Image: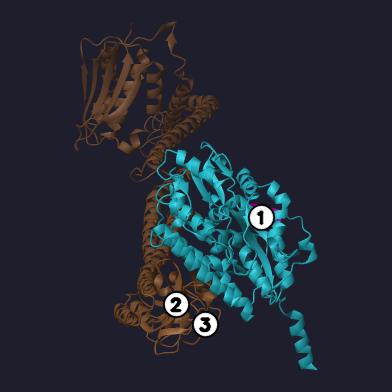
Amino acid sequence: MKGSLRWQVVLVLSLAAVVPTVVVGALAISRARHDVENEVKRGALAHIRALGAALDGTLQDARRTVELAASQWADAAGEVHGTQLLVRRLRRDVPIVQQLSILDPDGALVFGDPVPKGVDIGSHSFGGYIGDAVFGGATPAVHLVVQARGRTGELMGVFVATLDLAFVHDIIAAARLGPGARVLVVDGRGVPVATSDPFPIAAKAHDPVVDRALASTVEGTMSVGGWVSAYRNLSSYQSLRGVRWAIIHQQPEDEAYALARRTTRDTLVIGAAALAIALALGVFASRRLTRPLADLARRADAIAAGNTIEGPPIDGPGEIGVLAQSVDEMAKRIAERAELSAALARGDRLASVGVMSAQVAHEINNPLTTVLGYAKLLLEDKPEGHPDRAALELIADEAERMKKIIGTLLEYARAPRQSEPVIAGGVLGRADPAVVTRHVGALVAPQLKKARVAFVSDVAATTPAVAIEAHALQQVLVNLVQNAAQAMTDGGTITIAARPAPGGVATQLTVTDDGPGIPAADRGRVFDPFFTTKAPGAGTGLGLAVCKHLVTTAGGSIEVGDAGSGPNGRGAQFRIVLPNVT
Amino acid sequence: MRLAFFFALCACGGEPATPTPIKFLHTFNPSETELFNKTIADRGWIVDASLVPFARGHQVITEILRAGKACPDLIRIDATWLPGLVAAKLLVPPPEELARAPWTAISRELASLGGTMWAVPQTIDGLVVVRQASTAAPKSERIADLVAAATASQLAHPLGVRVDGYWLVPWLRAEGVELAPPAITSDGAVRGLASFAALFGTLAAAPPSAGSEAPDELRRWNTHELAYWVTGPWQLGDLRDRDQIEVSALEHAPRGGQLLVVPACAAQPAAGWKLAKELTSEQVSLIFSDAFATIPTLAIAQEHATPLVQRTLGALVHSELLPRTPVTPLLFDDLNPAVAAVVAGDATAEEAIAGVRRGWHRLEREK
């Protein structure tokens, strides 16, 4: 599923590459094919126009020369010597004249060769014409019939010339043709007169190209049977029926359209290469796009699973990068909210425990008082050295210790909340830090001496009174000093300092020791009720919680940090900030 | 038994027989041929059409019909060729249905010989005088008035006539000479030829080279070098601004036309006549008339023809048919070179007419 986005991106990019490539490629191929076809046809037509013009020109020259000779003969009124000279000159000027017959208007031979067979002579055929090809000799020939009219336009005779058509073959054989191409000349009956092929071809019966060429009025092209054909009428040659001869250029489509085929192949190769490159780029781009998305998905899964976010921020292009930043921000806020929720839950749990502890303490206190009272009464009755006295003293001591614990519990339970500031007699409490510090020093002196700990009071003379009940401040400082002393197993110094805080509205008191210090991991929890690092039975875990409640109830704050003065360069320092009495 | 069943299957499953194409021999020019092919194809006709150049049409068609081989089913001929083909018994008359069709009088006359219709008239043509609407009309149809009008023109060579025996006919007839072997012996023929030849270099421009007459005339008309142009419907289709063209009659002008005939040797005469009916129908004849200004032969088609065609027809009504004899088309073989010789100054009118007279006598002998 995670891979589907990538492949969808690849698919979209591929389509974006494939569709234009295919469309542009198809258009290019089609256009190239179309252009090449047109060029091939135009080229073939141009070729046969040139060849046809050469053929027409040769025949027209011959025809005009014969017509001129006929006209001269007619004006000379058939004079024999002049006729001989004229015919000799005509044969010299028009070498393609094979035979020449001169007839009078009635069709009788006047001079020259006998009239060839098949030539229709008569008044109805005196219009002058070139007929279809005849194949009696070694080469194809054609008969030319020309009227010999005199100066006045009167018909004086008829010239019948047989023209050798070998020049037709010579002209088209000399043509420079494309690969596989051939040129064919057919007469008005469709009979081949000459071809450029080394091996003469026979026109097929009802060859569609020949039929089309003979039926055409000028020229045209057609593709049939795998050949591209261009055809054109020869204006100077026509059959007796008036069907003009045709010159036909044919070339196999494979050869004619080779350029189009190469263009198609090149286009396909280039298109395939472009497609492959586009696909590779698509894959690369999709990976670049989807990798941050996948990372984001994994991070979202981790967030959903409640795990902490690890690793560097996700880097992504454009909007994806912005989204990654947003997700990181969201994860951070979710973590903060979770931590807050946990803290709230822990607070509720602690509050419940506190209430329960107070109730339990209250219920235990009375019977414990009874136990302690009876233990003391029994002690009074037992003289010194009585065997039961030690046990009774132990009971009394332990009961006393239990009452002390219960008293602390009850005190914690009774401690007002921050929203309920302690007001003594309607007036906020008041304590002089210097006085309270002296009292604390006196109270803890025996314990400190026993622990080989020195006590130093460093209260500035300018330290004002603070807004807290004196016994509460004393309890806080005693608690902190006792905790420090218990931690300083190798002795040391405990210093209580007091200074006006910057701004003049509060006072900072510090309790500093040069003991082992408090690990950083524990600092956030030292103020939690029942949290203790002491040996089981050595502490209740309520001391610092009570301290915090007393200080915060007075509108102050308390925190713990390094003193930097211990044997390991550490030591603990509690900083208390209390509002000054205004 | 199995073999018989196989043959039965072959017989039942064979492809339907392909209709036999109608063989049509025509004398259309290239443009007309294109329109003919398209019109026929659009109408689903299967026609094997062959073009015969008009100049050689008479000879070629006569030879084909005499040979009787590869005989066409329908032929388009010039009206002057009809007498020769009928005399040689090479044609069959049209069926009653076509003979009784509502042809106009001059159309029916064109297709008839001795009171019998031998052809279906396809178009009517002949010589008329064409001018721009802004050009003053000659006072009358007479040649003298045409010459007077041209003389009054400010143009260098305002008269368009062609060096051709067909154009000489009105000048011969104005001298009382008809296009027939006996008549050419009169002095009127010499006078007619002399006066006709005298037009060139004065009112008419010197003739262009042979074969380029039609495009030269068209160029001169389009460049307004001609005020009066003696020509026929065959050239009107190429003119621009047909609405601005006026047509008037020329006294003694020859009239003719194109006919559709079915040869006696036709393999499918009924199909030939059917195609002839289609080509002369109102719809098809108007297609050609609108494209080439040809004059239809059915009264209903003439009514729906363009104004130019109707004006041309109105002018041709006053013209006269050429003699209906077999030799008439052959007469031009001798007449045309004679006219050219006189116009070119190579011969006098007397010399030229004498040569024509000898040629026509030879024709008479052969006949």
Closer to the eye: label 1 or 3: 1
Q: Name the residue carrying label 1.
A: B285
Instruction: Answer few, some or many: residues within 10 Å of disc 1's Cα (few below 14, many 20 plus, some between 14 and 19).
Output: many
Question: Within the magenta stretch, is there residue A383?
Answer: no
Q: Are marks 2 and 1 in contact (CB under 8 Å)?
A: no
| Front residue of this view, candidates B97 and A469 | B97
- Subunit of mark 3? A
Report x, y in % for residue B344. 39, 59
- The residue shown at (63%, 65%) is B76
Q: Amino acid at mark 3?
A: Lys
The dot on residue A158 is: 2
- Specify the segment rendered in magenta: B279-286
**Labels 2 and 1 within one chain:** no
Residue A186 visible in the snapshot: yes
Q: Badge 3 is on which residue?
A: A204
| The C terminus of chain A, quarter of image | top left
- Say what amino acid the circle numbered 1 marks: Ser
**Chain drawn cyan in the picture:** B
Chain A palette colour: brown
Left or right placement of residue A523 versus residue B76 in this view? left
Alpha carbon distance from label 2 to label 1: 42 Å
- Is B269 drawn above or below residue B1 in the view shown? above
Q: Is residue A468 above or below residue A483?
A: above
Image marks 3 and 2: residues in contact by CB distance under 8 Å? no
Residue plotted at (40% across, 34% down): A531
Could you say where residue A22 lies in the image, as x and y percent from the top left?
A: 45, 58
Q: Residue at x 39, y 20 (%)?
A: A552
Residue A50 at x, y = what percent? 35, 68
The 10 Å Cα crowd at callout 2, few under 14, some 14 to 19, many 20 or more, is: many
User: SS for tag 2?
Assistant: strand
Query: Magenta region, mostly helix, strand or loop?
Result: helix
